[in-house]
Image (cartoon, rainbow, N blue to C red):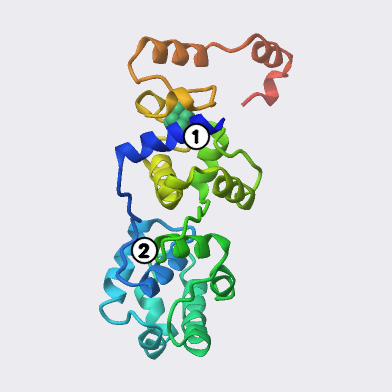
Amino acid sequence: MNAAQRSELFRRLAAANPEPRSELEYNTPFELLVAVVLSAQATDVSVNKATARLYPVANTPHAILALGEDALRGYIKTIGLFQTKAKNVIALCRLLLERHGGEVPKTREALEALPGVGAKTARVVLNVAFGEPTIAVDTHIFRIANRTGLGPAKTTDAVSAKLEKSTPKEYALHAHHWLILHGRYICKARTPECWRCPIADLCAYTLKTPEPGSAAAKIAKAAKNVPSKAAKKAAAATPRSTRK
Ligand code: SF4
């Protein structure tokens, strides 16, 4: 994708959602940090449900340490990997108090030194809490970058580096959210909704999904049900006893 197309892609995503927001609920950088740590391999909805119960009781490093790991587990037990996450959050609170006076640090190195905080979490916190133009790459952004040609690469770190380098400055702050929301609601993993996608003409994906019920969708469905010559040949060559 060239620079003009990249710029146009973000212009359209921005026009559709001028002020995108994280779908995680938080009021302070610390609440955001803990929510992002809890959100690894879990949905934002499940994290929001847990933090809605936890934060009124404990929303500072001091208060969560006072609560203790057992009680913390009780609040977050509906979230995947909660045992490990409870351990990490307790250790993270301790380190924040020991090294940063209970505040969330504003550098990537200091954030990544905290338990349970990897490159992705650090980028999210820097972007959302501190307004830095970082682009954390999750499963949605990784998929979109590769499908569309926006920043194709084999690892999330490589995609992140490509996107941070190539995203036009005026869109860098919100690029992370625009791409995540686009992946969540339109460019879905299994069946991207290309027929209603605002950036379809800029996207390099060749297997675009036609509008359900359209003539193109019917043709695609029929083509799917017609075995290819190669498949027919393979089936004919397979002994009956081994066919499923
Ligand atoms: S056209 Fe389809 S594959 Fe391309 S970005 Fe849009 S939804 Fe995703």
Residue lying at 37% horizontally and 29% vertically, measured from the top left: 198
Residue lying at 41% horizontally and 12% vertically, measured from the top left: 216
In the image, residue 153 above or below residue 36: above
Q: Can residue 1 be seen in this view?
A: no
Q: In which quarter of the image is residue 120?
A: bottom right
Of tags 1 and 2, which is closer to the observer? 1
Q: Picture coordinates of residue 21 (x, y %)?
A: 32, 54
Q: In which quarter of the image is ligand 1?
A: top left
The quadrant the N terminus occupies is top right
Give the CA separation, mark 1 to mark 2. 32 Å
* Residue at disc 1, secondary structure: helix
The quadrant the C terminus occupies is top right
Q: Quadrant of residue 242?
A: top right
Find residue 184 and name its label: none
Q: Picture coordinates of residue 12 (x, y %)?
A: 37, 34
Residue lying at 33% horizontally and 16% vertically, measured from the top left: 213
Q: Picture coordinates of residue 104 (x, y %)?
A: 45, 76
The residue that mark 2 highlights is: 47
**Direction front: furthest residue:** 169
* Residue at disc 2, secondary structure: helix
Q: In this view of the protein, which residue sits in the foreground, 39 or 175?
A: 175
Residue type, mark 1 in image:
Arg
Q: In which quarter of the image is residue 215?
A: top left
- State which tag comes first along the sequence, 1 or 2: 1
The residue that mark 1 highlights is: 6
In the image, residue 130 above or below residue 190: below
Residue type, mark 2 in image:
Val
Do tag 1 and tag 2 residues touch (Cβ < 8 Å)? no
In the image, residue 240 above or below residue 64: above
Circle 1 residues within 10 Å: few <14, some 14–19, many ≥20: some
